[in-house]
Amino acid sequence: MPHDPPSEFRLSCPVPLDLHTTVQMAHGGGGRAMRGLIEGLFLPAFAPPGGPRGPAHDSAIIPVGGARLAFTTDTFVVSPLFFPGGDIGKLAVFGTVNDLAMAGARPQWLSAGFVLEEGFALETLGRIVASMRAAADEAGVQIVTGDTKVVDRGKGDGVFLNTAGLGVVPAGIEVTPARVAPGDVILVSGDLGRHGIAILSVREGLAFDGALPSDCAPLGALVEALVALGAGLHCLRDLTRGGLAAALNEIAADAQVGMELDESAIPVAPPVAGACELLGLDPLYVANEGRLVAFVPGRLADRALAIMRAHPAAPDAATIGRVTAEHPGLVEVRNPLGGGRIVDLPAGEPMPRIC
Ligand code: MG
């Protein structure tokens, strides 16, 4: 069993009126155990019987009138509540904004649910709420509804947060793992592993030369720029728990394609690389909260990279690999000496309570 309950899943039931029902589930769980829980328990329990299943993704897509809404939810249990570069409130807003954006949607409305432990300092709650408001303003979304529950002292851990979100998918945009195909190029929007290392540095009492803040950031505006690629924007995924390794393994399995990465092209900042070495971690598995991976056809690779690098959220974007027809479901990393290794889905939850 996983350490944590599943952090993300979505059920999509488009157009129930004409009985054409599809189920899609998303799982940013970042581990084999989480995937097993979702596929073994939640999907069978919640899927309409006999309905075809689409591949897992970060948001459900719901046709409403002539439009398509993206709908998602996420729960936040990060410890500590405040960390370099962010806090639980900022994370809760940007996390849901980013899951909406990964469906190609423009994020617009959020809910906020608070589970508070009796005795939690109001001053601290005030700081978290102010941070949520600032994050919502920065991401261009509104928090329009919410809920608060209080649990007995000792039965919570200060505060847990849930956010759900709605966004609108622009016409002609279909961003889903099902569209990832051999010949696609794989791009990342920046260097990897900052969020996980920022949290661990506080927990483990590590000190670095200079600050090493989380990459926690909203990705909606970057995705809005990428939407200029139209139908060429095949798939997006934010690199949260389980990092790049989990995201690519999930998409490779769902799309039944292989992936080949060039290790020397994957950006990792020296302090993150150093901390990973110290902690015995592989930066490919470390969580991010402001990075995405994008899949576009080879002919659009240069244009996609130029759009990303011109955007303030992705100045260090890089092309890191390609999608192949060989070894479907496997992600292989090639090093500069010509050797290769398989990057597998993490077996468990290497870093609990990271988000
Ligand atoms: Mg996600």
Image (tube, rainbow, N blue to C red):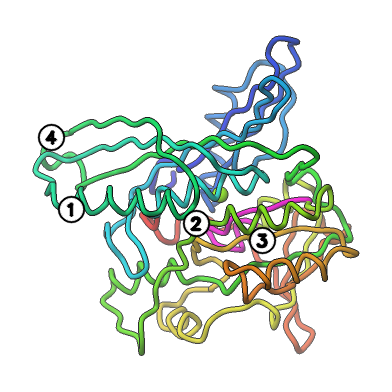
Using the image, tell me which numbered label, if any, was put on residue 152. 4
Q: Which residues are magenta?
A: 234-247
For label 3, the residue is 293
Q: Are marks 1 and 4 in contact (CB under 8 Å)?
A: no
Mark 2 Cα within 10 Å, few/some/many (few <14, many 20+)? many
- Badge nearest the viewer, 1 or 4: 1
Q: Amino acid at mark 3?
A: Val
For label 2, the residue is 241
- Badge nearest the viewer, 1 or 3: 1
Compute the Cα span from label 1 to label 4: 18 Å
**Which residue shows up at 76% across the image and 82% down it?**
339
Whole-percent x, y for residue 195 in the image: 44, 66
**Which residue shows up at 71% across the image and 59% down it?**
294
Whole-percent x, y for residue 206 in the image: 30, 80
Compute the Cα span from label 4 to label 2: 29 Å
| Quadrant where the C terminus is found in the figure | bottom left
